[in-house]
Amino acid sequence: RNDLPVYSVDEVSKHNTAETGIWITYGLGVYDVSEFAPNHPGGDKIMMAAGSAIDPFWAIFQQHNTLEVLQLLEGFRIGNLPQLEAAPVEVEHDSPWSQEPKRHALLKPTSERPFNAEPPIAMLSEKFLTPNEYFYVRNHLPVPTLQPEDYELELEVEAGEGQKKLKLSFAEIKALPKHSVTAAIMCGGNRRSEMTKVKPVKGLSWGAGAVGNAKWSGARLCDVLRQLGVQPHEQLHVIFEGADLDPTSHPYGASIPLSKALDPRGDVLLAYEMNDQPLSRDHGFPIRVIVPGTVGARNVKWLTRIIVADHESDSHWQQNDYKGFSPSTDWDTVDFSKSLAIQSMPVTSAICSPMPEEHVKVDGDGFITARGYAWSGGGRRIVRVDLTSDGGKTWHVAELEQEDLPDGRHYGWSLWTARLPISAEQRQTQSVELWAKAVDSAYNVQPEAFEHIWNLRGVLANAYHKVKVKLV
Ligand code: MTE
Ligand code: MO
């Protein structure tokens, strides 16, 4: 193996499409899998690593016959990586981007600056709690650097009853009673790339991976607000500000109704842990607010200020973004002030495995297995996920993996598995399209197609998830 040529990581990264040829690395080996990957079941999973290392993927897909694939892979070895390749360090001291954290190889960026990335969705249905390393990241601005020793959270009661001002240190927040909640966080633009196929929209082209499910721990916001003497009031809002500033020095901001913040069943947290680990910098270190059941945008990271006010946040992201519109509203007629800011999210689901165009083996009984996630906002439990492999003539109810919690407080996602029959004709044409739709505890169900829910920002993209796969 030492007689093979040496290729740099950089060189390997240029081979990530059918045109350039598909190279991957495993350990120090470099492999040309252009011929192998498209034709072998399991080979599609290799495609996720095109141009990069397969190691992190196999750490997760251990059960997928990787030994067999590995032996086959050896036949496609074309070279080696240099023994020690130090990554080139870019130094840009004056740039606001010079402090960005290092990210995991599984996060595939949709934009680098600001950093926005999702994992390949086949990873998502593998674990009920999404590992922190490849939980999607949605940043609007450079990541701020905060030190827990200097951290201060300012609270202000501008409207309604209560003590006017309070400052809490990181230590004081950690000294409050600790509370944990499992909650999925989903970007309002999750699955936007599917809506774009109807007609272009403005926004990052997210796949179905702008969502993750984690156990969050911290102090309850309702405890802090009660300590301040804040009383329930239907007309008031709680505004959150982050430490990340735009070029005009305005912080990222968002707000939620005070009623959600004060509701002990709302489980709103000043979170400092994600899956029992301190928050990472990308996810809001040292403190972020977690608003379970509510669109990702309101879960403000790097939280520095909380204001109880008689109006919503006046930030761009509350006023002129993350709102829904009629399919006939265009950029000439849009009036953001007339539309409701998204809070609770609608029911949705996605088929994570198989992936689009994946080669799937039909089992001895003539079935294939599909896996995915389903979730609804507002704490509504997923009660059913229906799958069809024949365009909706027959539906198959998936088996659900979910927490046993009271409805209205069901903030985590559900993973599902379904076995789907393959007809003789589908076997012959070697192709099938799978559809998934989820139903929540209010019997809300996903709309069938994107045509009639299209909106110019590409948010709330929750139509049936449809995936075409190849049969072998
Ligand atoms: N908070 C701050 N301070 N700055 C941001 O850019 N992005 C929001 C929200 N909180 C954002 C923020 C959006 S739109 C989403 S979808 C979630 O954070 C993403 O959370 P994550 O990056 O931890 O997955
Ligand atoms: Mo978002």
Image: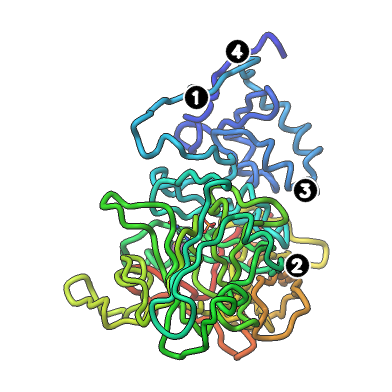
Q: Nearer the viewer, mark 1 or mark 2?
A: 1
Q: Is mark 1 within 8 Å of ligand 1?
A: no
User: What separation in Å lies between label 3 and label 2 (alpha carbons)?
Assistant: 18 Å
- The residue that mark 2 highlights is 367
The residue identified by callout 1 is: 10
* Residue count near mark 2 (Cα–Cα under 10 Å), binned few <14, some 14–19, many ≥20: some
N-terminal-most mark, 2 or 4: 4
| Element carrying mark 4 | loop
* Residues at marks 1 and 3 touching, judged by CB atoms closer than 8 Å: no
Q: CA distance from mark 1 to mark 3?
A: 28 Å
Q: Depth check: 114 or 354 in front?
A: 114
Residue 2, image x, y percentages: 70, 10
Of mark 1 and mark 3, the one earlier in the sequence is 1
* Contact (Cβ within 8 Å) of mark 3 with mark 2: no
Judge depth for marks 1 and 4 and give the one in front. Answer: 1
> Looking at the rendering, in which quadrant would you find the N terminus?
top right
Residue at which label 4 appears: 5
Of pointers 1 and 4, the one earlier in the residue sequence: 4
Structural distance between the alpha carbons of marks 1 and 4: 15 Å
In the rendered view, tell whether residue 266 sits above or below residue 290. below
Q: Amino acid at mark 2?
A: Phe
Real-space Cα distance between discs 3 and 4?
30 Å
Using a 10 Å C-alpha cutoff, classify the residue at mark 3 as few (fewer than 14 neighbours), some (14 to 19) or many (20 or more). few
What crowding class fits label 4: few (fewer than 14 Cα within 10 Å), some (14-19), or many (20 or more)? few
**Residue 297 in view, yes or no:** no
Measured as percent of width and height from the top left, residue 154 is found at 47, 63
Picture coordinates of residue 6, whole percent (x, y): 59, 14
- Residue type at the position of mark 3: His
